[in-house]
Image (cartoon, grey):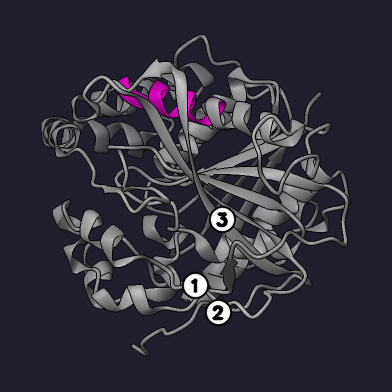
Amino acid sequence: MKKITALPKPDGSCQVGFTHLNFIDENRVDPFPQADGRNRDVPIIMWYPIDDPCERHPSKLLKIRDLVSLKHYSPYKIIPNRICDIVTNSYENAPLSSKTSKFPVLIFNHGFSSYMEQNTILMEHLASFGYIVVSVGHPYDGVASYPDGRSLPVDLGPLKDLSKDIRKNRNTFSKDIKQLARDDLSIQEIKRYTENYLNAGKALNDKVEIWVDDIRFITDVLEKMNEGLIQSKFAHKLSLEKGMGVFGMSYGGAASILSCCLDDRLKCGINMDGAMYGGIDDKYKYRQPTMYMDSDMFLGKSRYFFNINEDDTYCVTIKDSKHLDYSDYTYILKNWLLKLMQLVGKIDGSLMIKITNDYVRSFFDKYIKKIDAPLLERNPYREVVFEKRFRG
């Protein structure tokens, strides 16, 4: 396979800048033992539209220090060091575009054990169409990279608990998830099978609230940033009157939808191939426009939540895709080993990127920008199984 040296150019008219920040939540003590009782310190990367990079060079995809942190978790040891040499289309700390007075805001959440830049292609794509996209780091459940040079690896303890859950409940999980692909189930049966397979991952059900709290904290930060209470280039530049969109991949997708259930400032959400861990809890009320984007690994895993949502709901299933196809890996690292591990599928990586980019942007164009999104009315992709349910 051809070695990738640069990310594809975004389709929008804007060039893209980014900045790396972190914020301490004075109202929360970090529950992880490595934090030694300190308050939760949440890093973010913000991608945004710019007019001119001002002689800056585009950034590289990943810092060496963060790849080292990533490789503390053994499955990531297969990632070659050359990933750090891939050139992006983003310019660090370039001036914000002056062509628009305010920009719509989206919040993104990475997968469990992953890192903030895992969907840089998608972040750049959205920013090139005028969005400000904020990727939230979730310390100790993912690589937490900070502007001061710190890079915290994943806490391996919960990952061991998760692996133990998977081994112990593998048969139960497989049996229940297969049942969800049937067409003859009542909503009560769909709920029972969904609850059963989610309960097979107890470690993931137990900690999702930490991620939801991180998302809501960063939502607070963005409001203060817009008001000028936090000094930044984004003061009075964030279009928050229509609310923010939230989305994520894998575990970050589940956390995104759950945060949307609890916080009215988050007006709509997308879950990119994430099992809805924690989502059966009655405190979560599914009342916002939602899109579930699934690979064809576990058909039906989003079915219950698709059916109970009280607002417009979409399900996009991409044929021949696997879990990591919903990240940059589908483009930069689609090798034989990942295919053997059933982590990426047969679908062409460039096509997967295009489909994902198109559906994510169309959804937020409709529900955040409030503009027409023809793709949500008519599916042009033969690789996509598209379902929709409208409110009322």
Question: How far apart are labels 2 and 3 at the CA level?
Answer: 14 Å
| Mark 2 lies on residue | 57
Q: Is residue 213 magenta?
A: yes
Name the amino acid type tagged 3.
Thr
- Residue at the outermost bottom position: 2
Q: Quadrant of the N terminus?
A: bottom left
Q: x and y percent of residue 209 in the render?
A: 41, 21
For mark 3, give the secondary structure.
strand
Give, as a single range, the part of the protein colored magenta: 206-216
Count of numbered circles on the image: 3
- The kind of secondary structure element at disc 1 is loop
The residues tagged by marks 3 and 1 sit, at their Cα atoms, a distance apart of: 11 Å
Residue 278 falls in which quadrant of the image?
Answer: top left
Q: Nearer the viewer, residue 157 or 144?
A: 144
Of the residues shown, which amino acid type is indicated by label 1? Ser
Tell me how far mark 2 sits from mark 1, CA to CA: 6 Å
Q: Is residue 121 magenta?
A: no
Residue 124 — which label? none
Q: With respect to residue 368, does 345 lie above or below?
A: below
Residue 50: x and y, percent?
73, 65
> What residue is shown with label 3?
19
The correct choice, above or below, for 16 with respect to 72 in the image is below
Instruction: Tell me the element at label 2.
Output: loop
The answer to whether the residues at label 2 and label 1 have Cβ atoms under 8 Å apart is yes
Residue 59 has which mark? Answer: 1
Depth check: give the residue in front, 48 or 385: 48
